[in-house]
Image (cartoon, grey):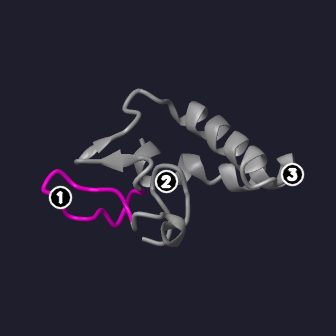
Amino acid sequence: MSSCQSCSMPMKKDPKGGGTNADGTRSTEYCSYCYQDGQFTEPNITRDEMVAKVKTMMQEQMKLPGFVAGLFAKKIPKLKRWAP
């Protein structure tokens, strides 16, 4: 996967190279911010909360304008974690 299937962060930007599965292997689907030891780090976060969180982080940490951050955050509902 080229992007985390929870938050849409490019996997190449993950400082740990991806999250970890329960058996300790590296996850190729989820980043280390979203997934550790085979579990989501925020298991109760909703899709809409994740969209808002990512948009805010992109604006504050990456200094992206709101409309650009919004464009990236729009992809989140289509990711594997949030599929119905």
Residue identifier under label 3: 65
Q: Residues within 10 Å of mark 3 (few under 14, many from 20)?
A: few
Q: Are marks 2 and 3 in contact (CB under 8 Å)?
A: no
Asked if 66 appears above or below 44 in the picture, the reply is below
Q: Which three-letter amino acid code belongs to the residue tagged 1?
A: Gly
> Residue 54: percent from the left, percent from the top?
63, 44
Q: Residues within 10 Å of mark 2 (few under 14, many from 20)?
A: some
Q: Which three-letter amino acid code belongs to the residue tagged 3?
A: Pro
Which corner quadrant holds the C terminus?
Answer: top left
> Residue 73: percent from the left, percent from the top?
67, 49
Mark 2 or mark 1, which is nearer the start of the sequence? 1
Residue identifier under label 2: 79
> Residue 58: percent from the left, percent from the top?
71, 50
Q: Which residues are magenta?
A: 18-31
Residue identifier under label 1: 24
Asked if 29 appears above or below 48 in the picture, the reply is below
Question: Is 24 a magenta residue?
Answer: yes
Is 27 on the left-hand or right-hand side of 7?
left
